[in-house]
């Protein structure tokens, strides 16, 4: 048998390409089929959603009009005037008399009947349409002056009309109008115009346009291709709405779920905190319409079979920004928001908040099981507030599991302090975040081997390997990063007794509107794709198993020794063995896996293999599956699997076991 040589972690592994050991004989692994060491939570592999990088407005939320209700700080941002062929007119920003959450509207004043007069909307870094698809434009309007006014909407390829529709019959009272257009061609960069015909003044607001192919065909719904990518990953949970967006730049700017439910006119548009966060990627046109609000998050979770996992402000604004603290004496409002949220999700239809859920079309409860208190907060000010939340939530809803934060970093003084305090509090789940170089992920595959089993469980709530080898846009989502995450994830899986949930972050990015990179899924206004990292996540989340079993070499688990990382699980519902082996070395590796336990002897299994000899390889809109799994098969002879793992590969095997 080959002598087993540990690869020098932290030294050799920091070097690229990886140094491989010369191999004459296969590395011999053994799986103990009957020795279950932990159950795997059904929530194990999930999703982290935050409205960053145009993830909601301009992304998942299929609304095509930017600044649809003229509520941005500059009410005309996103809009240009159209005035050609002798047309004359003006537009004026007006304030609603009884504003509620919707403050402004626009008066369009047409002074003659010549030419074209109206508005052009820029969309979210442009606008795209698909041939043959219907687009529904809705808006509210009232006549301020004149009569026989008509609104004509046009989809144009430069000057050529590829879709058009009109509506007239406006009165002096606000009412909603609709125009349906069919696009005559597929076009990214369509010129959308909203034109006023006749002579007079028309007041307009909430000019909104959606494609008909939304997820489940829902009115004002979500982008189908993006939801499908989420559903395909078989997520155990959906964390929302973030991220730092929960905390806000200051408390005023925090995420307040109650302002995100009900009719759109009741959802107050707000500046997105990522609008100004990064000097190198300022995004002045980034706002939150809350078209995806808390009802939609719950609904999405249900649609894709994920446990909803909302995170709420604990009364501390982002400590990287203002760090504003609500006084303890005024924390009630925040705590009540948490209690009311649980009622909104789970309460009976005759409860105050359960009734609101029912009104929105979901009388059945959403069965909320988790709630997060704070995101990346730290210090005694967090613990002080967390204790108050815990007392109130547990008194009213003892069955709901609370997620607490260990701050923004995976180690260090603040991290240790928070873990110490959270242990004393008997916290249930602690959220850990790590945005680190790929080498950190490879070197930390044993991170949880020695975690205290008697304390809180872990939610690896935000992680991503941040490659330094390339920095251009989506290219950071390269194979080195994804493979290193896979290596680390075998460690999460081996320790599934303590790590109960895990999610890559962030989830989405618009190729022309991002602030943070890398991200799991990239898109433009027409297309989308899963990164190399997405495919790694999917390999794990679609092959989770229900219980961990040991996979060892010379009696030890594998976490980088000889460039190999491994974990194994049993799926007790399908009676299958699932093993995951990552080979970070640049050379191919032969391994054998002996099946120790009940197995018939010979058989055949399925092998998903993801490999690339180029660590900087990446997927893109033009080549969306450049690095993605290939399906192969393997044979079992005399209870032993023999595999040759490609260099720089992530491998998942599935094998039906004997009855
Ligand atoms: O995922 C992007 C950001 O990273 C999140 O908003 C925050 O929680 C973390 O710092």
Image: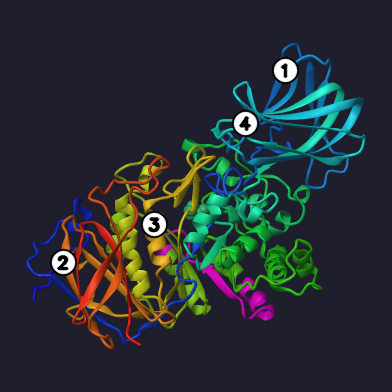
Specify the quadrant that holds the C terminus: bottom left
Position in image of residue 386 (x %, y %): 59, 69
Residue at numbered disc 4? 122
Please report the residue visible at 42 percent of the width from the left and 68 percent of the height from the top: 416
Disc 3 on helix, strand or loop? helix
Residue at numbered disc 3? 535
Distance between mark 1 and mark 4 Cα atoms? 16 Å
Question: Do the numbered discs 1 and 4 sit on residues whose CB atoms are within 8 Å?
Answer: no
- The circle drawn on residue 630 is none
Disc 2 on helix, strand or loop? strand
Where residue 287 sits, quadrant-wise, is top right
Residue at numbered disc 1? 83
Residue 389 within the magenta-colored segment of the rendering = yes
Where residue 489 sits, quadrant-wise, is bottom left
Question: Do the numbered discs 2 and 1 sit on residues whose CB atoms are within 8 Å?
Answer: no
Disc 4 on helix, strand or loop? loop
Position in image of residue 114 (x %, y %): 79, 14
Q: Earlier in the sequence, mark 3 or mark 4?
A: 4
Residue at numbered disc 2? 590
Please report the residue visible at 41 percent of the width from the left and 71 percent of the height from the top: 544
Q: Which numbered disc, 2 or 4, marks the residue closer to the eye? A: 2
In this picture, is 38 found above or below 78? below
Q: Earlier in the sequence, mark 1 or mark 3?
A: 1
Question: Do the numbered discs 2 and 4 sit on residues whose CB atoms are within 8 Å?
Answer: no
Distance between mark 3 and mark 2 Cα atoms? 24 Å
Residue 505 within the magenta-colored segment of the rendering = no
In this picture, is 169 found above or below 351? above
């Amino acid at each position: 048998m080959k002598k087993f040589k540990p690869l020098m972690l932290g030294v050799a592994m920091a070097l690229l390409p990886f140094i491989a050991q010369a191999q004459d004989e296969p590395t011999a692994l053994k799986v103990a089929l009957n020795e279950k060491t932990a159950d795997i939570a059904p929530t194990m592999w999930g999703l982290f959603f935050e409205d960053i990088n145009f993830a909601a407005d301009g992304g998942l939320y299929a609304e095509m009009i930017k600044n649809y209700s003229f509520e941005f700080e500059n009410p005309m941002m996103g809009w240009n005037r159209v005035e050609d062929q002798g047309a004359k007119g003006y537009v004026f920003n007006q304030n609603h008399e009884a504003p509620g959450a919707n403050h402004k509207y626009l008066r369009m004043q047409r002074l003659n009947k010549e030419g074209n007069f109206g508005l052009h909307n820029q969309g979210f870094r442009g606008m795209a349409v698909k041939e043959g698809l219907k687009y529904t434009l809705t808006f509210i309007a009232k006549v301020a002056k004149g009569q026989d006014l008509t609104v004509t909407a046009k989809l144009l390829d430069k000057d050529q009309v590829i879709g058009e529709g009109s509506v007239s019959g406006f009165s002096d009272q606000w009412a909603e109008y609709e125009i349906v257009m069919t696009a005559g061609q597929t076009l990214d960069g369509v010129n959308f115009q909203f034109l006023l015909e006749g002579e007079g003044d028309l007041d307009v607001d909430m000019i909104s346009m959606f494609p008909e192919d939304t997820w489940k065909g829902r009115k004002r719904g979500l982008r189908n291709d993006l939801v499908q990518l989420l559903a395909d990953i078989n997520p155990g949970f959906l964390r929302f709405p973030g991220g730092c967006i929960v905390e806000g730049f200051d408390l005023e700017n925090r995420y307040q779920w109650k302002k995100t439910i009900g009719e759109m006119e009741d959802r107050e548009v707000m500046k997105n905190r990522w609008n100004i966060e990064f000097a190198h990627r300022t995004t002045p046109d980034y706002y939150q319409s809350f078209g995806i609000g808390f009802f939609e998050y719950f609904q999405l979770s249900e649609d894709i079979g994920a446990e909803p996992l909302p995170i709420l402000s604990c009364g501390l604004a982002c400590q990287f920004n203002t760090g504003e603290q609500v006084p303890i004496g005024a924390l009630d409002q925040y705590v009540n928001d948490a209690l009311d949220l649980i009622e909104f999700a789970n309460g009976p239809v005759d409860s105050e908040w359960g009734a609101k859920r029912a009104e929105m079309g979901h009388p059945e409860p959403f069965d909320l099981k988790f709630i997060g208190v704070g995101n990346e907060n730290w210090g005694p000010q967090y613990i002080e507030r967390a204790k108050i939340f815990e007392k109130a939530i547990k008194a009213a809803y003892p069955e709901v599991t609370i997620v607490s934060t260990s701050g923004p970093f995976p180690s260090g003084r603040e991290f240790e302090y928070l873990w110490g305090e959270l242990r004393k509090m008997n916290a249930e789940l602690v959220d850990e975040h790590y945005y680190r170089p790929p080498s950190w992920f490879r070197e930390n595959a044993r991170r949880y081997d020695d975690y205290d089993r008697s304390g809180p469980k872990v939610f690896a709530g935000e992680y991503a390997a941040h490659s330094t080898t390339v920095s251009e846009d989506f290219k950071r989502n390269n194979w080195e990063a994804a493979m290193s995450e896979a290596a680390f994830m075998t460690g999460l899986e081996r320790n599934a007794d303590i790590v109960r949930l895990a999610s890559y972050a962030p989830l989405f990015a618009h190729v022309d509107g991002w602030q943070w990179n890398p991200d799991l899924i990239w898109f433009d206004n027409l297309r989308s794709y899963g990164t190399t990292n997405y495919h790694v996540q999917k390999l794990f989340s679609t092959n989770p198993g229900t219980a961990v079993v040991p996979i060892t070499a010379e009696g030890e688990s594998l976490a980088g020794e000889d460039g190999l990382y491994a974990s194994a699980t049993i799926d007790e519902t399908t009676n299958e063995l699932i093993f995951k082996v990552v080979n970070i070395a640049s050379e191919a590796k032969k391994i054998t896996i002996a099946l120790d336990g009940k197995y018939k002897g010979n058989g055949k299994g399925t092998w998903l293999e993801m490999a690339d000899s180029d660590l900087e390889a990446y997927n893109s809109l033009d080549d969306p599956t450049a690095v993605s799994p290939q399906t192969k098969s393997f044979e079992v002879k005399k209870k032993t699997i023999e595999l040759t793992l490609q260099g720089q590969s992530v491998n998942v095997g599935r094998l039906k076991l004997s009855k």
